[in-house]
Amino acid sequence: MMGRTIFIDPGRCIGCQACVSACRECDSHRGTSMIHLDYTDEGHSVASLPTVCMHCEDPVAPCAEVCPADAILVTADGVVQQADTTRCIGCSNCVNACPFGVPKIDLQAKLQMKCNLCYDRTAYGLAPMCATVCPTGALFYGTVEELQAERPGVQVADTFVFGETEVRTGVAMVVPAERVQWPVPGGLPVVEINGKDVRR
Amino acid sequence: MTEPSEATAAAEPDAPDGPSATSPSATGPRSVTTRATLVGVAVSALLILAIVLGSRMLRNFDSALLPYAVATVFLAFGVAYRYTVWISAPGARRLFKQGWRSLFSYENFRQAPTALPRMIATYLGFQKFLGARSHARWAAHQLIFWGCVLAALITFPLTWGWFTFTSGSGSGPGYEMRIWGFKILGFDSLNILGWLMFHGLDIAAVLVIPGASYFLWRRMKDRGAATGQRFAYDLVPLIALIVISVTGLLLTFSSIFLHGGGYQFLAILHMVSVVFTLIYLPFGKFFHIVQRPAAVGMQLFKYTGRKDDEVFACRRCEEPIDTGPYVENLRGTMRDLRLDFDSWAAYCPRCKRVLRGSAYLSHVKKGFK
């Protein structure tokens, strides 16, 4: 962590879906959007959460580690690429192992697809499509210094916790200053399912 | 063209310090290398033995084809070595075992005896999944695939001295085709069958050239294909196929229209391109030829694991995830790799995102609401 990357601030997301539409225009996966926009408390809150690939650094790319066909490569700049079309056998291991729920699978085409940080753009220093169009800055592309220059006092976190396991990522989230020393909860352990407390 | 700097494979089997090496249940990198080397040597030795025996103690061996035969021995070593390393990684190892277990399971024999041949035809022969990606790519790949299959069926046995064409009259036109010294069929070299027999490789070249050219054109023009492509990995295989096919056709052109002019030079050029490709095969894009059958094993495992059409459902939203045995297999792979959040595999991707969003909402940035 952390060169030029995406910083996600769910507090700024208004759920406009501009990122979803723009992602579809990316040349490396034209026609298919790789970004997910979820409403975390649908019916009760307008809060929404955009999810791009977090480009896990430690452990490095769990999706690639569980891939039985060695189809997912990580480039030296830390970008976890989408599956090599030649190798991918469409087994869904990556889809179900990803702690962030990012990869998609086309079962007919036997092909995994995921956000590749718009590699056709970021390799040339351009911002990814989603960050380019986001009207509220919920998705910001740049260095942490550039982010803090625009938003004085803002803090970011790049570590998430799933149960006992911490995952450090290449993409970071904006967090309140008092939370910066703690890893961001990843949702595991699950405390409630459909309104029922499942901790016991 | 976007060329990523040195690609490091997170799960690259060649990487001795890859993630599989950290697995407590995985074999150490040194022992994997040793085992892969031993398997490679054993397979190469078996091939040499098969060449010697199949060519009737080298009596039928064509010494002019020696470089090709040597290249196939290196090919056998490379494929066996890379294959062994590949299936030593946790993800591949588990799937490899489950695929074979499914194949020989009672369930498979009893309930789906035709599943395997059907899957082999669908995935490996007609590659239906490629049609779902793009009809043009499917057509081009079919041309390359059947061209290469035809070429391999002709050239490998020829270079090993397994096939021989003999003529009782010395110069034809009646020929006998023999395999391992046994007569298979007799034919007249001047009729259609004879023409097809002697021009099989030309036909293969005519199939491969348009297919490989299409993919080469696509790699130049399609920005999706060009994203992250690497010259050695993505372009060299296509160039190699085209060079082999064109030089092969030029040999025929030389013998028919130039009375053999330039034949020797072309023969060497053709041989160099073939030998290079055979040696490159295990370590580049062509290795997918060896890997692709894993898709059949995977599919068979899922097929036999789906009892009464029941699937494992997401614990939160109850959307189907996959078959129960498959999810359990994945969780085992994750534990092998010390990815200790394997219980997360019981939730669908959307629920994982929503639960993470809820946790952020309630524990990180409450004003987010």
Image (spheres, helix red, strand yellow):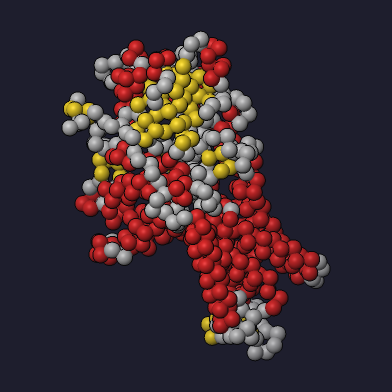
The answer to whether residue A43 is visible is: yes
User: Going by the picture, which residue comes out furthest to the top?
Assistant: A152
**Which residue is drawn at the image coordinates 47% and 46% (left, top)?**
B19
Left or right of A20? Residue B73 is: right
Camera-nearest residue between B66 and B170 = B66
> Residue drawn 32% across and 33% down?
A163
Quarter of the image where one finds residue B191: bottom right
Image quarter for residue B95? bottom left
Q: Nearer the viewer, residue B37 or B280?
A: B37
Task: Please give the name of the residue rendered at 35% of the width and 40% of the height, measured from the top-left corner.
Answer: B340
Q: Which of A3 and A45 lies nearest the eye of the viewer?
A: A3
Specify whether B259 is left or right of B103. Answer: right
Name the residue rendered at 33%, 49% in the picture: B332
> How far across and down, in percent of the image, does residue B167 sit?
65, 86
Q: Could you say which is closer to the camera, residue B224 or residue A125? A: A125
Please tell me how many numbered marks the rendered image carries. Answer: 0
User: Where's residue A122, x and y in %?
Assistant: 58, 28
In this picture, is A142 found above or below B40? above
On the rendered image, what quadrant is the C terminus of chain A found in? top left
Q: Is residue B68 above or below residue B283?
A: below
Q: Residue A70, image x and y in percent?
A: 48, 49
Q: Residue furthest bottom?
A: B168
Q: Is residue B254 above or below residue B301?
A: below
Tell me, yes or no, if residue B83 can be seen here. no
Indicate the position of residue B355 as horizontal and vertical percent values.
Answer: 31, 27
